[in-house]
Amino acid sequence: MIKIFGRIMLSARLAVVARARDRKGLAPRLAGPERSAALDSLTPRFAGMPPKSGTFIYCCEILIGTRMNFCFESGRRMRIIGCWWMSVLLFACGGKKQEVVTVNVAEGKMIYESNCKTCHGGAGEGNGALKAPSLTGLGEWYMFRQVLNFRNDIRGTAATDTLGRQMAAMVKTLKDTLAVRNVAAYIASLPDASAAETLTGNWKNGENIYQSICGSCHGAEGKGNVKLDAPRLRSLPSWYLKDQFEKFRSGQRGTHPEDKFGAQMVAMVEMVKDEQSLLDVITYLRSELPAAK
Ligand code: HEC
Ligand code: HEC
């Protein structure tokens, strides 16, 4: 019994892992490898009082024979405070110190300018000649997940995926998960730099296909749905949408066993029957939406 209690004391740690910056006030959800990476990046240090307002993600890790991780969004205050007090108690009993990890946008800007700007552009507008997509408007949660996927060899590893491999090599130079968080937060703070395109597909047919297959996840207008982990598509350049769709089809993306979100897309690609249908969907996604119906 004493032994078990000792282990709890030694390993309880609570951290404010990230301040949610999403405009809608939604905290980016942490799951699977992201959650483990976030927890792994913590050096235990005592956290001080829990913040009273704002949206934060708290992670609390307790070892009782087996490792248990809890992540809470600050909407659920009661449970967070319970978790916080529990770790204070454990700290008082001799637990390790805990650390507060907060996102630093200024740091993210420095990382972006030295590591990302050459390809993705000063305003995150992308560069068609280098096949680097625009990054604005995609959401911090999605940026974070993709950069981590590249870093953790979940995306951009196939021998044939030259561009993905290029990108993966770039993010492996980032110091740690916190650097990934910071750069994702900076990109999310940039104003949307995407502009509509004029494409030759059939808009109406594209709308039909989109609404019957894609909209349930990517949102009725293609603006993404964080709750379903599906990113915004409307801001991405047409060539990139096509390339990624083809990558899901050819198995260059979404086939890693830990890529559960990519796997959802792989299951979808067969539903777009031919090249023309894909062009139609992309034409729909890249056009201005008609004024409110
Ligand atoms: C050498 C050029 C280059 C540099 C530098 C670079 N990238 Fe990329 N990035 C790319 C390319 C090319 C792709 C498209 C990969 C593909 O086709 O799968 C990409 C894709 C991405 C994606 C995926 C976007 C999506 O919608 O899925 C993210 C996120 C990203 N880059 C972030 C970054 C960040 C953050 C940095 C800096 C730390 C960075 N990139 C540096 C070339 C680059
Ligand atoms: C079951 C839900 C679901 C449906 C339906 C769905 N998607 Fe997706 N899609 C996702 C998820 C989740 C991701 C993110 C994958 C990841 O994290 O790598 C995604 C990613 C994408 C991407 C990559 C975007 C980027 O930034 O790299 C494209 C392109 C895409 N979807 C197009 C479509 C199209 C077109 C359709 C309809 C034919 C569709 N999706 C239907 C869930 C879905």
Image (tube, helix red, strand yellow):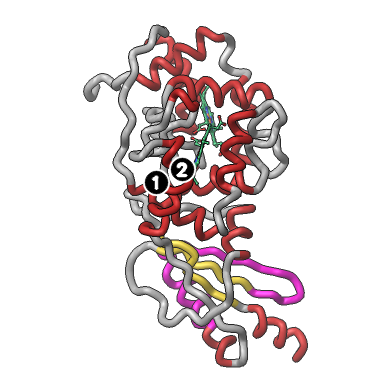
Rendered residue at 61%/86% (across/down): 95
The magenta region covers 62-87
Q: Residue at x 58, y 51 (%)?
A: 173
In x, y percent, where is residue 21? 37, 55
Most extreme residue toward the left is 291
Q: Is residue 62 visible?
A: yes
Q: Nearer the viewer, residue 98 or 84?
A: 98
Q: Is residue 277 above or below residue 15?
A: above
| Left or right: where 224 falls relative to 193 | right
Badge 1: residue crowd in 10 Å (few <14, some 14–19, many ≥20): many
Q: Amino acid at mark 2?
A: Cys
Cα–Cα gap, marks 1 and 2:
10 Å
Disc 1 vs disc 2: which is toward the camera?
2
Q: Secondary structure at mark 1?
A: helix
Residue type marked 1:
Ile
Q: Residue at x 44, y 18 (%)?
A: 282
Indicate the secondary structure of the residue bearing disc 2. loop
The earlier-in-sequence mark between 1 and 2 is: 2
Location of residue 92 in the rendering, given as x and y in whole percent from the top left corner: 56, 91
* Residue, disc 2: 116
Q: As drawn, is 23 to the left or to the right of 46?
A: left
Q: Residues within 10 Å of mark 2 (few under 14, many from 20)?
A: some
Q: Residue at x 57, y 61 (%)?
A: 38
Ligand 1 neighbours mark 1 (CB distance < 8 Å): yes
In magenta segment, residue 63:
yes
The numbered disc on residue 187 is 1
Vertical arrangement, residue 127 with respect to residue 93, above or below: above
Q: Position of residue 153 (x, y in %)?
A: 67, 44
- Residue 220 visible in the displayed image: no
Of 248 and 61, the residue lying toward us: 248
**Disc 2 CB within 8 Å of nearest ligand 1 atom:** yes
